[in-house]
Amino acid sequence: MESQIIPQSNTFEQENPTELLTDIMQSVRRQWQIGVIVGASVFTGVIWLTLNEQPAYQSETLILLSNDKRVPVEIPGFSQTNLTGSSEDLATEVQILRSKSLLLKAIDKLGPEYSELTAEELQKQITIKQAGDADVIVVSYIDNDPKQTKDVLDVLSNTYVEYSLEKQRSQATSGIEFINDQLPTLQQELNSISSSVRIFQERYGIIDPQSYASQISDYKMNLQNQIQNYIYGTGWFPKPISRITKSNY
């Protein structure tokens, strides 16, 4: 019995090119519709945000910090003293101006119209920085309300100026108190030195140079007055002496 090998054939179904093109067009059309919907949604959202976004207003002011040149005071018998107190750098000044206590003083001056404004909110909306290398700081405030921006910045400026004046008064008071505290001790030392000088002069017969010079000046002036009175009283005036020199040729 013969065995036969039956050949197997693989068959492939070929698609119609027209149907394939139709499927591609339908897919593109579906994707295009989705893209248009998404794009329209994004565009609509941007327009809504733009129309509903409130404009921000920024205002700023310049404040000149006191640049007092502290002159050291030297008092005999005492260490070198600075009457104006210790120096504070600009960074410390900025931190003080941003402090909650100072901002609360500014808020109290705004009145009931801004009663909902807090110091924490104010700290977030203000910016304090140095203007270059000068002793000037720039204070800026940003808010959606232009009136509030101006009112808050004006109050902040006034509060900072009052703080600066109070600081200067405090330094001046400290200096005056220091001088008043040292005056009795200095007066005692001055009296002791004067007494020692007087005893030394009396013991060794030393004449006070200033007093001696004053006596000499008075004696000279008195003598000149006597000579003038004598001349005008007697009518005698010294005659000028002329000398004639004969030349031999």
Image (cartoon, helix red, strand yellow):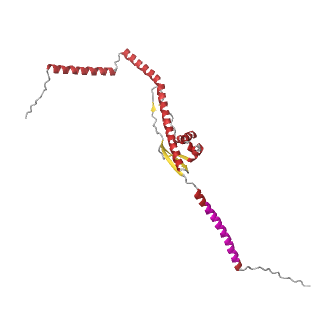
- Decide which of 155, 65 is in the foreground and name it: 155
Q: Is residue 84 visible?
A: no
- Decide which of 157, 109 is in the foreground and name it: 109
Is 139 left, or right, of 3 in this rendering?
left
Q: Position of residue 224 (x, y in %)?
A: 22, 21
On screen, residue 32 above or below 182:
below
- Decide which of 1, 164 is in the foreground and name it: 164
State yes or no: residue 32 in magenta.
Answer: yes
Q: Position of residue 69 (x, y in %)?
A: 45, 37
Q: Residue furthest right?
A: 1
Q: Position of residue 40 (x, y in %)?
A: 63, 65
The C terminus sits in image quarter: top left
**Residue at point 60%, 59% (across, down):** 48
Is 182 left, or right, of 98 in this rendering?
left
**Residue at point 48%, 37% (across, down):** 165
On screen, residue 60 above or below 228:
below
Q: Is residue 29 visible?
A: yes
The part of the image, by quadrant, that contains residue 27 is bottom right
Q: Residue furthest front?
A: 112
The N terminus sits in image quarter: bottom right
Is 222 left, or right, of 128 in this rendering?
left
Q: Position of residue 92 (x, y in %)?
A: 54, 40
**Residue at point 64%, 63% (across, down):** 41
Point out the stretch of residues depicted in magenta: 20-45
Secondary structure, magenta segment, majority class: helix
- Decide which of 25, 174 is in the foreground and name it: 25
Total marks placed: 0
Is 44 left, or right, of 139 in this rendering?
right
**Residue at point 60%, 58% (across, down):** 49
